[in-house]
Amino acid sequence: MAEIIQRDGTWAFDGNTVRITPGLHRSVPLFRQTYGEIAVPLEAVASVVYEPERKRGRLRLRLREGADPLLQATGGRLPDAADPYRLTVDLDRSGVAEYVAEEIRRGLLLEQIPKEPAKEYLLPGPPVPVSVRSSDGTVSFDGTQVRIDWSDTSDRVKRATGPRIIDVPDLVQVEWLPNSGYEDGFLRFVTRETAFSKLPPEKDPFALDLWGSARRDLLTALVATAVTARLPHPSTRTGEYLPADAPRLPLTTRDAVPPEPQAANHDVLLRRLRELGELHREGVLTDEEFAATKAAVLRDF
């Protein structure tokens, strides 16, 4: 067993699995503490390196492309401090860090782990159900459905459409960009019907606009990861691995599958359509935004 215990967290390698446990110190980002312990099978590891620095060093684990739904969902956009595959190491423990790295490298060599992209997810992602309250609303996922409940500060367009419920089979992709504190982020659920939507996140009823607390909004990556883990693996889309930041292929008319009709409340439908009409007449919605939002409301009913 090779193990290193630091304030930032603990890494333990038993020859088959790298077990990463986040530290409990207040300096450890909320995202890592919430994501919890991660058991990384050796077959998911591409390489490991210890990077010494002037004051502290850093252990860094690199995973094979396509092996982890977290990396697929976040596309390398997690802030460095929130990256669970990095461990800050005190200088007096640099020898231990180098030993742990060497043991993992030895395991990769002995097991002859390939470095090419994985054809399936080798990590499960966060457990469900998972629910996160963001600046734009609360997003929840139970393993089969995504639900978005808008907050009082959400755009009038979104509140007019009501809660958003999306079944996993209707999803094509999840897009996530963190709120940096300087620029807004978003969490968007792309369906076959909305793949070509041009609505900005603040008006898109299938997207959360992340503009509040960067620390809190970062937790939406939990939902993005949990959903991504249950979507078809990227390698199945074109027969080979498709990186997270690769452009989506356009969907043909043949690919589009109309959603099943849902039970409608006639009065609620009329009220929401009237609200959208008022927003359109007042100039709050453009013609394109009105048409797209109206279509979303009608689909839900």
Image: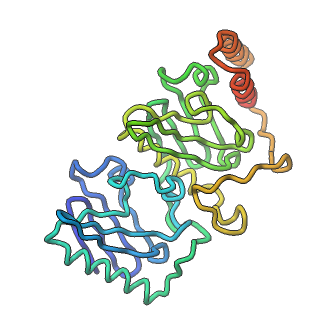
Q: Would residue 16 be found to the left or right of residue 28 on screen?
A: right
Name the residue rendered at 60%, 32% in the picture.
200
Name the residue rendered at 46%, 69% in the picture.
63
Name the residue rendered at 21%, 77% in the picture.
96
Q: x, y (%) of residue 57?
A: 24, 67
Q: Would residue 299 be found to the left or right of residue 17 on screen?
A: right
Quadrant placement of the C terminus: top right
Q: Would residue 49 be found to the left or right of residue 251 on screen?
A: left
Q: x, y (%) of residue 52?
A: 24, 70
Quadrant placement of the N terminus: bottom left
Name the residue rendered at 30%, 69% in the picture.
59
Residue 106 against residue 240 in the figure, above or below: below
Residue sitting at the far left? 92
Residue 25 against residue 18 in the figure, above or below: above
Q: x, y (%) of residue 56?
A: 20, 64
Q: Would residue 136 be found to the left or right of residue 261 on screen?
A: left
Q: Is residue 26 visible?
A: yes
Q: Quadrant of residue 148?
A: top right
Residue 161 against residue 4 in the figure, above or below: above
